[in-house]
Image (cartoon, rainbow, N blue to C red):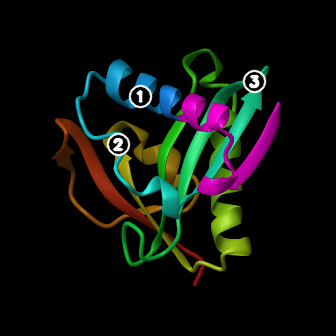
């Protein structure tokens, strides 16, 4: 399994297609949620993904400060269903935080976390900064990580 971090323009057509395919599989089809998956933020983002046999098996979208929030952000966190509960989600989150904090020198990272994943994100140092709210009929809360 190989990990990559690429800017939008560096993605091959095949990689972009596979990334969007997996994001739609997880966030639209699996979660039965009709929402605008292609939201215009991809060109300003970094794309961290794990590939195995030419397939995307894990992915996060890394948004520099000012793209979605005043802080940097991690979004579209996914691991394909057969590889969940293997530690791959933990690894891709650690790589995401390291890239934003060490390469982009971001001091804070804000996420919109699904409520069921609260403890997962807390394990990386994210703290809730909102009450639970519905986003596309799925309970979410805002969380922030800080290295101050």
- Residue 89 x, y percent position in the rendering: 62, 37
* Residues drawn in magenta: 1-19
Q: Identify which residue is drawn at 42% across, 40% down.
A: 117
**Can the viewer see residue 7 in this picture?**
no
- Residue 56 x, y percent position in the rendering: 65, 29
- In the picture of the structure, the residue carrying the numbered disc 2 is 114
Secondary structure, mark 1, is helix
Magenta stretch: residue 123 in it?
no
Going by the image, does 24 lie left or right of 140?
Answer: right
Q: Quadrant of residue 102?
A: bottom right
Disc ID at residue 24: 1
**Can the viewer see residue 104 in this picture?**
yes
Q: Identify which residue is drawn at 69% across, 53% down.
A: 10
Label 3, label 1: how many angstroms apart (C-alpha)? 18 Å
- In-front residue for pair 16/80: 16
Badge 3 or badge 1: first in the primary sequence = 1
Q: Is residue 123 above or below residue 129?
A: above
Secondary structure, mark 2, is strand
- In the picture of the structure, the residue carrying the numbered disc 3 is 54
Single out the residue that lies furthest toward the bottom.
148
Badge 1 or badge 2: first in the primary sequence = 1
Quarter of the picture holding the C terminus = bottom right
Q: Are marks 1 and 2 in contact (CB under 8 Å)?
A: no
Badge 3 or badge 2: first in the primary sequence = 3
Q: Are marks 3 and 1 in contact (CB under 8 Å)?
A: no
Q: Identify which residue is drawn at 59% across, 28% down.
A: 18
């Amino acid at each position: 399994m190989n990990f990559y971090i690429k800017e939008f323009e560096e993605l091959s057509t095949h990689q972009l297609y596979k990334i969007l395919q997996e994001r739609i599989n997880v966030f639209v089809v699996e979660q039965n949620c009709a929402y605008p998956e292609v939201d215009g933020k991809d060109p300003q983002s970094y794309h961290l993904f794990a590939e195995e046999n030419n397939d995307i098996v894990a992915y996060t979208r890394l948004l520099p400060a000012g793209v979605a929030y005043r802080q940097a952000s991690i979004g579209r966190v996914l691991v394909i269903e057969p590889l969940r509960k293997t530690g791959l989600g933990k690894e891709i989150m650690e790589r995401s935080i390291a890239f934003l904090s060490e390469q982009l020198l971001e001091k804070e990272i804000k996420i919109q976390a699904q409520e069921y994943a609260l403890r997962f994100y807390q394990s990386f140092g994210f703290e809730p900064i909102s009450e639970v709210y519905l986003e596309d009929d799925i309970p979410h809360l805002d969380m922030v990580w800080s290295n101050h």
